[in-house]
Image (cartoon, rainbow, N blue to C red):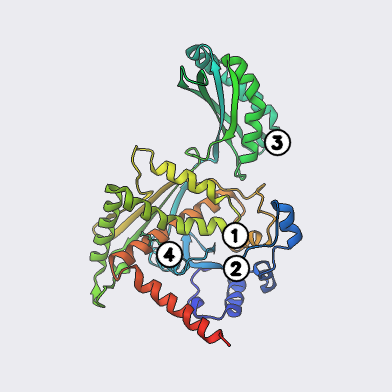
């Protein structure tokens, strides 16, 4: 399929459904899954507590994307105007190289806290010596996971403190390959199963047993290379800016984010505009990804940009590196009809492809934001969209 759907944004909603159905090979009736009442009240009532209704968001697709050599439409659920247009425009500029990703093995970390350890050094040494046995025990707890090529991989231990209100404290990390699951339930179950044994080996008491959302064992890298010619734009006073100058300005904006945490946060917000929109559309735990992304951005001791842009002789190169834990099996929202449609539209059957798409969307929205900031400023596009919204509201007012 081709993700180039010229004029898609200008078509009516019904026409967009028809064009998309044709492009991805789904019946047009499938779009009932994103009609306003797609999530039935009875289903919603079973999902969380104290339910009084459901909450809808606009559901769209970003077009023009090529990710790892294949064209794909990217589902996005988000309230902010211009994110979908920005992603689609950036994806068009990136088409010569496409987005190229490297997705790590889906290894999550489970933490077991051990408190009141009388001799912390001896406790650490004892857990280290028993690591093989503990991983084996964890593996037998989840035999089906191991059969699917996943399951517990390794175990390590760190001293946190020798003295304090909780006595000697150490933390054990269990590394678990979760395959296509996000893995929270799986990892928590394993940590709970191992905690007593670990505490006995360490000579302390079991404390918390829970996965870490700093999923630095589950990483994605996405790169693209934009020929200068693709970047030419319009300046604030309506003059033309050459592509090479736009590339230089984007690289300077990237360096600004590397130097200043106040800017880096906003730069990363522009990345999460794309990432989160995909995560929401596909029913993922976006709070977990957000928490991990920002912690990772601080790993060097100060808050840094997750993506950087470097100007080369005739192209601008972008690279985004971030932790990104998603699942295509087992999640609370994977039974949601809109989520199922989102995955079908993007042709996603495995978590690693969803990771690649969310990250590509993030690099695309980052590029679009920096290009707008480096040329005509962000307000012009925003204001045009607001004007469109106002015009529609006026038209619809009786
Ligand atoms: C707005 O949602 C996102 C931006 O502020 C990102 C950025 O400044 O890079 C435009």
Q: Which residue is drawn at 32% across and 55% down?
A: 317
Report x, y in % for residue 303: 35, 44
Which type of secondary structure does the marked residue at label 1 adopt?
Answer: loop
Q: How far apart are marks 2 and 4 (CA)?
A: 18 Å
In terms of sequence position, does the residue under pointer 3 or pointer 4 come before the other? 4
Q: How far apart are marks 1 and 4 (CA)?
A: 18 Å
> Label 3 neighbourhood size at 10 Å, few (<14), some (14-19), many (20+)?
few
Instruction: Give the quadrant of the C terminus.
Output: bottom right
Q: Residue at x 73, y 62 (%)?
A: 41
Residue behind mark 4: 91
Q: Do the residues labelled 1 and 2 touch (CB within 8 Å)?
A: yes
Report x, y in % for residue 217: 49, 37
In terms of sequence position, does the residue under pointer 2 or pointer 4 come before the other? 2
Q: Is mark 1 within 8 Å of ligand 1?
A: no
Which type of secondary structure does the marked residue at label 2 adopt?
Answer: helix
Residue behind mark 3: 144
């Amino acid at each position: 399929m081709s993700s180039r759907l010229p004029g898609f944004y200008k078509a009516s909603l019904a026409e967009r459904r028809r064009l998309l159905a044709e492009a991805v090979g789904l019946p047009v009736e499938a779009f009932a899954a994103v009609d306003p009442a797609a999530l039935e009240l009875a289903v919603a009532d079973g999902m969380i507590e104290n339910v009084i209704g459901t909450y809808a968001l606009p559901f769209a697709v970003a077009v023009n994307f090529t990710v790892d050599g294949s064209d794909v439409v990217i589902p996005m659920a988000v309230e902010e105007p211009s994110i979908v247009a920005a992603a689609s425009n950036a994806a068009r500029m990136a088409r010569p190289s496409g987005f190229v990703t490297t997705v790590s093995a889906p290894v999550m970390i489970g933490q077991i806290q051990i408190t009141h350890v009388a001799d912390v050094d001896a406790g650490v040494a004892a857990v280290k010596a028993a690591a093989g046995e503990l991983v084996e025990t964890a593996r037998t707890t989840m035999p089906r996971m191991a059969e699917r090529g996943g399951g517990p991989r390794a175990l390590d231990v760190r001293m946190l403190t020798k003295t304090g209100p909780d006595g000697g404290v150490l933390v054990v990390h269990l590394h678990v390959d979760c395959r296509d699951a996000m893995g929270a339930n799986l990892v928590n179950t394993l940590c709970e199963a191992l905690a007593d044994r670990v505490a006995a080996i360490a000579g302390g008491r079991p404390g918390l047993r829970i996965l870490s959302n700093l999923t630095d064992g589950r990483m994605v890298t996405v790169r693209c290379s934009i020929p200068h010619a693709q970047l030419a734009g319009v300046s604030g006073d309506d003059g033309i800016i050459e592509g090479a100058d736009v590339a230089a300005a984007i690289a300077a904006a990237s360096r600004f984010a590397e130097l200043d945490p106040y800017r880096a946060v906003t730069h990363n917000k522009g990345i999460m505009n794309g990432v989160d929109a995909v995560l929401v559309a596909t029913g993922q735990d976006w709070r977990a990804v957000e928490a991990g992304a920002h912690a990772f951005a601080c790993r060097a001791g100060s808050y840094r940009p997750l993506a950087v842009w470097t100007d080369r002789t005739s192209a601008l190169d972008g690279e985004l590196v971030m932790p990104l834990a998603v699942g295509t099996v087992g999640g609370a929202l994977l039974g949601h009809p809109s989520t199922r449609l989102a995955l079908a539209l993007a042709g996603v059957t495995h978590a690693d492809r969803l990771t690649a798409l969310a990250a590509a969307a993030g690099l695309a929205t980052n590029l679009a934001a920096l290009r707008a900031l480096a040329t005509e400023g962000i307000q012009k596009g925003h204001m045009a969209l607001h004007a469109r919204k106002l015009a529609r509201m006026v038209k619809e007012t009786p």
